[in-house]
Amino acid sequence: MFDSGGCVPSASRCDHCPGSHTGELPCLASATVKARSWLLIEHPGPWPERIERLTGPAPVAAAVARALAAGVRPQLIRRPGRAGRRSVPPLQVYVGSSMPGGPVWLEGRRLSTLAELDKLDDDMLAAVAAGRRPEFGEPLSDEEPVVLVCTHARRNVCCARHGAPLARALSARFGSLVWETTHVGGDRYAANLVCLPHGLYYGALGAAEAEAAVAAYLRGELTLERLRGRAGLPEPAQAAEHFVRSRTGELGVNAVSVESLTGTSPYEAVIDVSGARYRAIIERVEAAHECGSDCSQNNGSWVVRGITLLNPAALV
């Protein structure tokens, strides 16, 4: 039975609201807003509760600190299962950009020693933060995305409880594309999945939903079921994109872009869908499911108040 008297995350049990991990609670428009560029470093662990508190190995901790200072989101990654706990090189590093409206790319490099991380200096990370390739590694093709599953138990037990088995299941089907990772945001939505380089977030996933999401991504598409949104976009813009995709049926990853967002709830967004433009009115509302007014896990949801197809004259 769920105990609603406190709702504070625990190291040993789940205190998230009922329905958080099953898809019953809405996870729409909850992707990490600030993440537009990425540094992924293979590090088998142990992982600290917060990545910014990492103290070693020293080259990894220093690279994480430089990334944070540059505005690049660092993630520690490892292979699913026991194989991911090995601690000898070669180790994998990725840098990438998922900047909405900008270049979307990933570079990968295998390190023979951790000292090679020192080559990823402040200038290179500044380029990554600006969406430019630093030429630190080899560019990855569209057939080589990175799929991250949060399994960060020290941050929240639910991430390991729901994420670890999902990572193993995805690895069995998609192989080397899949990595376990540190906190990606939204523990209440575990199991969480992030598809890079586009920064697509999915939450409250079971194996079937996750496999469908990754398979779609390999086709250049997304699925709307359990889609949290696109990293780097403001939450109302994420919601607007979701509702317009639902209305039009357009699932191509690169076929939809949010051109503008104005207002303060209701928000007005203009969205381009393969050359056709739509105006969406989006409003934040209280979540339908709550576990008490004092629960820190409460969050709002989003509704669409109207979607209008704009002709060219309407945009002048």
Image: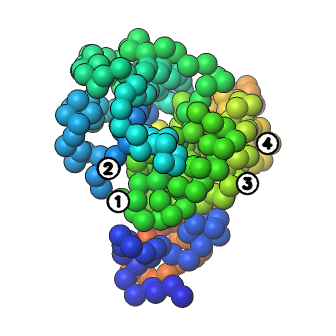
- Labels 2 and 3: the sequence-earlier one: 2
Alpha carbon distance from label 4 to label 2: 45 Å
The residue drawn where x is 49% and y is 42% is: 83
Q: Secondary structure at mark 3?
A: helix
Query: Looking at the rendered structure, which numbered label has been put on residue 154?
Result: 1
Amino acid type, callout 1: Arg
Quadrant of res 241: top right
The spot of residue 162 in percent (x, y) is 55, 61
Find the residue positioned furthest to the top: 135
Q: Earlier in the sequence, mark 4 or mark 2?
A: 2
Which residue was labeled with disc 2?
Answer: 46
Question: Quick one: label 4 or label 3, which is nearer the N terminus?
Answer: 3
**Mark 2 or mark 3, which is nearer to you?**
2
Q: Which residue carries the number 3 mark?
A: 208
Residue annotated with mark 4 = 248
| Residue type highlighted by circle 4 | Thr
Question: Callout 3: 10 Å neighbours few (<14), some, many (20+)?
Answer: few
The secondary element bearing badge 2 is classed as loop
Does the image show residue 259? no
